[in-house]
Structure formats: C-alpha cells, structure tokens
Image (cartoon, helix red, strand yellow):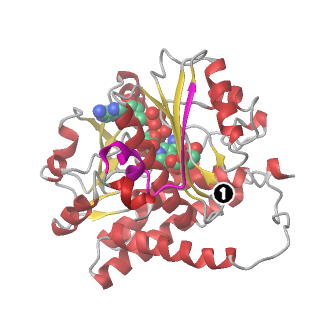
C-alpha cells in the first residue's frame, strides 16, 4: 500500500488530504514579530505562483488554511483564464490589520517569501496595502504591486475595477442585447478599493445603483459622487442587499456570498463582481443555473489586478494592461456561449476552458530546450 493511501485512512494525517491538490504549503512562524502566516502554492504548470497576501483575524487555523487553499486554487484558474505565464498561489497572515501590523512583521514575511527562491510572487490583498510590501520588498525581490515610485505598477484595483465594468458590459450583452452600463439597475456590496470605482463608473454611465458598506464614510463619498453624475444612488442595509430588486448583483466585499441563504433571496438576473470565491461551493453554481440567474465566474471578472501585477514583472506598461483587461469581455462571452451550448453551468465551462489551457501548456514543458531568458526579462531573474 502506498504512503498516501495508508496515511489518508488515519485522522492524524488528514491535513495532507486537505492539501492534496496543492504542490506546497508553507507555515511561517516568527515569534519575534508575531508573524503567523501560511503560503499556499497550488500549481506552477504555467509558471511561478502569483497571488496576493491577505491579512485577517481568522478565528482558527482551519479557517486560515481553508481560505488560503481555496484562494490559491482560484489563482491557478485566474492565471489560465487571463493567459498570463504564472501559476496559482496565495498567502494569508493571521492577524488584525488595524492593530497587528509592523514593518518588522512584513520584513519577516518577506524573508519567508524569499526562502521560496522565486516559486511565489506576492503583493496586496484584503487587509494589506502597498506600503506593507515596501517593507517586505527590502527582504525579497519576489514582490509585486508596489507603488510606481518603487518600480511597481501602482494601485491594481484600478484595472480590477475596469475589468469588472467590462464583465458587466458582456453580461448586459447576454441579458439585454447591448453593452450599455447606464439604463440598468445594480445592487453593489462593498465600496472599497474596487467597489467604489465600479460604482463610480456605473454612476457616470447614468445607472441607478443600490449600495451597501459597513463604513459610513464610503457611503457618504458615493452619495457625493452621485451628485456630480447623471446616475442615482440609494443606500441599502447590509442585510437587505441580497433581496434588493435590481438587474445585477455586484459583490465587491468578501467571498462565499452565493450560498443557500442568499440564493433564496436574490431577485436579480445576473451576478458579476470583484469578490474572490463568490460561490460557497460548486452546488451553488448549479442552484443559480436552475434559478436562471446568470453567473459571471469571479476569477475571469476580477482578473484585471492580476493582469497588472503580472505585467509589472516584465516592466509595467499600462496600455498593454488595459488592452489585456479588455479581453475579459470576450472571455466572458465565450464562457456564456459555451455554457449555453453545452448546458453546463458557467463556472463549469470556465473551469474546463482553464483546465484545457493548463493541460496544453504542460505539453510545452515536456519539450526540452537549453535554459533561456524569457523575451521580457523578469525583474529578479535578470
Ligand atoms: N483589489 C483588487 O485589485 C482585487 C480585489 N479582489 C477581491 O475583491 C474584493 C474587494 O477587494 P478590495 O476592494 O480590494 O477590498 P477592500 O477591503 O478595499 O473593500 C472591501 C469593502 O467591503 C466592505 N465590507 C466589508 N464587509 C461588508 C459587509 N458585510 N457588507 C457590505 N460591505 C462590506 C468594506 O467596508 C470595504 O469597503 C475582495 O474579495 C478581493 O479579494 C479580487 C481581485 C483583485
Ligand atoms: O490583484 C493583485 O494584487 C494580485 C492578484 C490577486 O491576488 C488576485 O487577483 O486575487
């Protein structure tokens, strides 16, 4: 009997079963700074793993591990969908971003990233900011999403929001036969770095939006923005956003928001948003399909940020980033059409497209050539 078969029967080894789809999971512990982090590398067939680092006061190690495993797997699919030569990875730091950050903690994190020797590149995500990674970048070159003055591409939420708006256009084409953003209604959850920019874009196009956020200042800011546009904004409580009658639900806060409870409440025709891992699990994709709610797979819609941070490693070019981000529109229409023809859910169709791309690329890795530099020199390989 093989080791994997023998140990998978024993409860003591169930941690390995949880991580069995992943190439490598690194637990980072630095008592001097209080750093407790997990780095997960899901798959490097397409290239070195790439994915942001989240900081959150997780309730348990299990919660943190589950989050980083799910998020890093999502990055493998996101990289394949965006056709960038990187694999899937992600990191989580266990801690409260308001009280537990320090320059030394991020330096310690940078040392762990460095120890992976280029198998993993990282930068900002929920709970972390570009400034945190300036500290990390003193210990490692494998950091992306740095401010422009530090040689980075700057705020990646700008292309992410642009990509979400392209995703909304593609969805409107499927629903209404045109790409117009205005003239429709949207229920938007979360007005953070991405959500605020998406909401502003919709207001500028003259749309009618319903918004919720737990921060009063963000709500005031979007009302001020609306007063300068042809659009209209209505504030909704965080509980009522799911049952708000609108054409589209636009989740831009956190994952797992498509679940048994919310599906029973939705009155929208489609869901298109920035949040990672929106479906709590695969059955929720099927439930949306049965309810005839069109779901735009999150990792296609929100890939604008990835496109920018990946591009940054070749020497940032914002025009190229925008051109690649526009492809989100075509990629989504391709997935919607494929799902229509095959009868699969949109998530299944998107996953299949990505898995095919990864399998095809794996064949290229079997073709031996002498080591060569990539066409564009990756910063820390030069
Ligand atoms: N920033 C980026 O470029 C990318 C972000 N994403 C995902 O998009 C989502 C949003 O990202 P960011 O805007 O960067 O994060 P953020 O932290 O700036 O914004 C999140 C917003 O959600 C609000 N929020 C939290 N709980 C809420 C609740 N219960 N009800 C309503 N609002 C609530 C927060 O107050 C905040 O304004 C996250 O899931 C992130 O993983 C995905 C790809 C790239
Ligand atoms: O957006 C980024 O900064 C990195 C990419 C990423 O982690 C993501 O798309 O979730």
> Can residue 244 be seen from the camera position used here?
no
Vertical order, 291 against 340 (above or below): above
Residue 129 located left or right of residue 317 = left
What residue span does the magenta drawing correspond to?
A: 10-29
**Magenta highlight on residue 95:** no
Crowding around mark 1 (Cα neighbors within 10 Å: few <14, some 14 to 19, many 20+) is: many
Residue that numbered label 1 is attached to: 321
Snapshot quadrant of residue 196: top left
> Viewer-proximal residue, 110 or 4?
4
> x and y percent of residue 227 in the render?
40, 34
> Viewer-proximal residue, 162 or 109?
109
Snapshot quadrant of residue 362: bottom right
Residue positioned 38% across, 43% down in the render: 66
Task: Find the residue positioned furthest to the left.
Answer: 264
Residue positioned 77% across, 55% down in the render: 314
Residue 166 located left or right of residue 59 = right
Answer with the quadrant where ligand 1 appears in the image. top left
> x and y percent of residue 283 in the render?
22, 61
Residue positioned 16% across, 51% down in the render: 260
Residue 131 located left or right of residue 254 = right
Dot 1 beta carbon under 8 Å from ligand 2: no
Residue 134 located left or right of residue 93 = right
């Amino acid at each position: 009997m093989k080791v994997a078969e023998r140990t998978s029967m024993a409860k003591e080894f169930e941690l390995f079963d949880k991580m069995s789809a992943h190439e490598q999971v690194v637990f980072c512990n630095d008592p001097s700074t209080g750093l407790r982090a997990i780095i997960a590398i899901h798959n490097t067939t397409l290239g070195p793993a790439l994915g942001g680092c989240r900081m959150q006061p997780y309730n348990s190690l299990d919660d943190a591990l589950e989050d980083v495993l799910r998020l890093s797997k999502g990055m493998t699919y996101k990289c394949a969908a965006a056709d960038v030569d990187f694999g899937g990875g992600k990191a989580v730091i266990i801690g409260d971003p308001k009280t537990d950050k320090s320059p030394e903690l991020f330096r310690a994190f940078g040392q762990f990233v460095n120890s992976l020797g280029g198998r993993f590149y990282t930068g900002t995500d929920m709970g972390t900011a570009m400034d945190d990674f300036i500290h990390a970048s003193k210990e490692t070159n494998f950091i992306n999403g740095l401010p422009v003055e530090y040689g980075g591409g700057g705020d990646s939420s700008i292309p992410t929001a642009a990509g979400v708006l392209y995703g909304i256009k593609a969805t409107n084409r499927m629903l209404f036969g045109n790409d117009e953003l205005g003239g429709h209604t949207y229920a938007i959850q979360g007005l953070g770095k991405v959500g605020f920019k998406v909401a502003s874009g919709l207001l500028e196009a003259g749309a009618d939006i319903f918004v919720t956020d737990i921060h009063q200042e963000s709500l005031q800011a979007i009302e001020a923005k609306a007063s300068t546009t042809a659009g209209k904004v209505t504030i909704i409580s965080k509980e009522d956003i799911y049952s708000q009658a609108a054409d589209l639900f636009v989740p831009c806060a956190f994952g797992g928001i498509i679940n048994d409870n919310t599906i029973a409440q939705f009155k929208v025709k489609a869901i298109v948003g920035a949040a990672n891992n929106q479906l709590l699990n695969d059955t929720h994709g099927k439930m949306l399909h049965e309810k005839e709610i069109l779901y735009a797979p999150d990792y296609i819609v929100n890939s604008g940020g990835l496109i920018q941070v990946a591009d940054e490693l070749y020497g940032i070019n914002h025009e190229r980033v925008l051109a690649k981000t526009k492809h989100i529109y075509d990629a989504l229409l391709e997935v919607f059409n494929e799902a229509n023809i095959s009868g699969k859910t949109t998530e299944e169709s998107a996953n299949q497209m990505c898995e095919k791309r990864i399998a095809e690329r794996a064949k290229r890795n079997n073709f031996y050539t002498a080591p060569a530099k990539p066409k564009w020199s990756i910063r820390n390989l030069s």
